Amino acid sequence: MLTTRRLTADDPLLRDWHEAVRDAHLADREPAWWESWEATRTYLARPADRTAYVIVAALDGGVVVGGAEVSLPLVDDTDTLSVVLGVRPVHRRRGAGDLVAAEVRAVAREHGRTVAQTEVYVPAGVAFEDWCGGAFARRHGLGSVSAEDRLLVDLPYDPDRLGRLTDAAQVPEGYRVVSFTGPCPDDLAPEWARMRTQMNEDVPTGELTRSASVVDVERIRTSDVRMAEQGWTKVRSVVLTADGGGAGYTELFVSAHDPDFVLQDDTLVDRAHRGRGLGAALKAANLRQLASLGERVAGRRWLQTHTEQGNVAMQRTNERFGFRRVDVLHECEGAV
């Protein structure tokens, strides 16, 4: 008999839930990153501050066959929730997904949320509505409102290619690139916070209901601490002007718990400094720094990034760096 159950952070079924949802989302896809069990249990165990989480498991008897993670923003966009929902392929088409979706709607009612959001990955060349995840989302009233490509490049990164890119992406006069690993240095934190805020304003979201939140130095510090607790190492480069102002940044994330993937997170060039090749210079500098980590990144097989489909400049930069498109991430939204 299919049932649902909400799990606490110390529930003995929590790891089974994590594995079931992971298996659901990685099935029938190109290699893809998924949050590690170690990182997941760490953030779920924290007291809620900016986001609260509700975990729903789908069970067939005593066996977890799928479930959902419901994220409830507590500061911005408090009329929304986001959900990651999945059912293992061998247990699909028996009603487990619909049962979990009904429980997610119950969570929404309890917390006064009227807008639901989710992400659906669709293989390149397949229409959103023709993919199982897209069809399920549409059936539950969620449509695609924004799309970005998921891109991969093989690791270790080709040193000859990196050398050519470095030669071609010289830092223009009047700028300098500073690279570092780990927490943001005190002297860079204010500019880093300012640029993070700009990134939130600039990132394309289509019709997605999402506010551009302001990032301050305290949030930078909190993020550094919490990601380190989850096993992440941040590999970062920033480009500075002659007077020390931030003109752009990029960062890679390396997990101690993931043997395969490195994640490319944000790359931003300040509006006033675009068109000078700074994005490519930042990426080249950060890839050199990644290679310098040696054993700390040994065995990693892929570097993963996402780029909005309409971001022509970054699409071209990623193509120069050898990234290949593997599937499309659809940001979906609908009324609860």
Image (cartoon, rainbow, N blue to C red):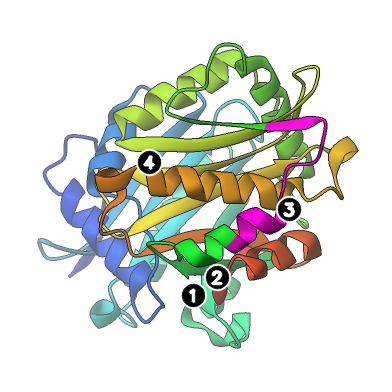
From the image, state whether disc 2 or disc 1 is nearer to you: 1
Provide the residue span drawn in magenta: 164-176
Q: In which quarter of the image is residue 21?
A: bottom left
Camera-side residue of 146 and 295? 295
Give residue 174's position: percent from left, percent from top. Answer: 82, 30
Between the residue at mark 3 and the residue at mark 1, the CA separation in whole angstroms equals 20 Å
Residue 54's tag is 4
Between the residue at mark 4 and the residue at mark 2, the CA separation in whole angstroms equals 19 Å
User: Badge 3, how many Cα within 10 Å: few under 14, some, many 20+?
Assistant: some
Q: Do the residues labelled 2 and 1 touch (CB within 8 Å)?
A: yes
From the image, state whether disc 3 or disc 1 is nearer to you: 3
**Amino acid bearing label 2:** Ala
Q: Do the residues labelled 4 and 2 touch (CB within 8 Å)?
A: no
User: Badge 2, how many Cα within 10 Å: few under 14, some, many 20+?
Assistant: many
Between the residue at mark 4 and the residue at mark 1, the CA separation in whole angstroms equals 21 Å
Between the residue at mark 2 and the residue at mark 1, the CA separation in whole angstroms equals 6 Å
Q: Which residue does the numbered mark 1 point to in the structure image?
A: 133
- The answer to which of marks 3 and 4 sits earlier in the sequence is 4
Residue at the image point whose x is 70% and y is 25% from the top = 214
Q: Is mark 1 on a helix, strand or loop?
A: helix
Residue 205's tag is 3
The reply, left or right, for residue 218 in relation to residue 222 is right
Q: Can residue 268 be seen in this view?
A: yes
